[in-house]
Amino acid sequence: MAVAQTLGAASNQQQQGPGMGVRIVEKAIGGNVLPLQANRFTRSTDGVVLSAEAQDACQPLPPVVYGYIRVVAGDEVRATILKADLLVFCCANGFMHSTVFTDFGVDDTAVARPGFASLLDVCRLVGSYGVVVPARTHLSSFAPTLDVLTRQLRRTGTKLLAVDEVTAAGPSGMESIAHREEA
């Protein structure tokens, strides 16, 4: 009851922000008062419900992808450029870009890789959609090693997205990559 009274009383208050008025709803919880933006709520006979704006904000997040690159030891500039390329790709294709895992100076045939091992750990988290790489060669250009690493990724339930393959496929590139990964 106290919370409902506080919500009702506070919905009429105004707080001035930089150049605009922002209505504040105060919600009393355990003696603490937490400010909430009032425009996220509407009053109804049943109480407080989410406004259309707040419901839009609660829509599902885009799929979460993690990046992986393998570069020559000490080539920080190249690593930075590749990370930026992955970010651009993710933004253009509606993915939520998370961390990029990097292995510096790892041999093309090596299966034990610290950055890749960490990548596999986060791919097992709920909500992980996939791994984005500039090209499959960032995993390996050696077919047996590529097969091993790709199988490890598939076991986590994530998809492998290679930027060069999607870009070469044109506008339907994401659909063809997704189909191939399902097969």
Image (spheres, grey):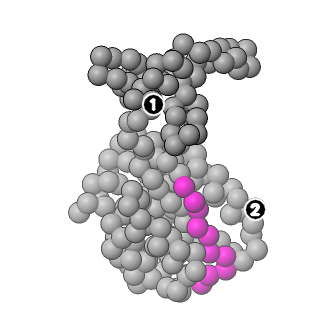
Figure quadrant of the N terminus? top left
Residue at position x 58%, y 49% from top? Answer: 87
Residue 169 in view (yes/no)? no
Q: Which residue is mark 2?
A: 77
Q: CA distance from mark 2 to mark 1?
A: 54 Å
Q: Is residue 26 above or below residue 137?
A: above
Which residue is painted at 41% across and 49% down in the image? 63
Q: Earlier in the sequence, mark 2 or mark 1?
A: 1
- Amino acid identity at mark 1: Val
Residue 74 shown left or right of residue 29 in the figure: right
* Residue range corresponding to the magenta coloring: 98-107
Residue 5 in percent (x, y) is at: 45, 23
Looking at the image, residue 21 lies above or below residue 124: above
Q: Secondary structure at mark 1?
A: helix
Q: Nearer the viewer, residue 182 or 1?
A: 1
Q: Amino acid at mark 2?
A: Val
Q: Give the residue displayed 59% in from the left and 15% down from the top.
A: 13
Residue 103 magenta: yes
The answer to whether residue 120 is seen in the rendering is yes
In this picture, is 112 found above or below 57? Answer: below
Magenta highlight: main SS:
strand
102 vs 181, nearest the viewer: 102
Residue 3 shows which numbered tag? 1
Q: Residue at position x 52%, y 34% from top?
A: 28
Q: In this rendered view, identify the residue nearer to me: 91 or 38.
A: 38
Measuring from the top left, give residue 171's x and y in whole percent: 40, 40
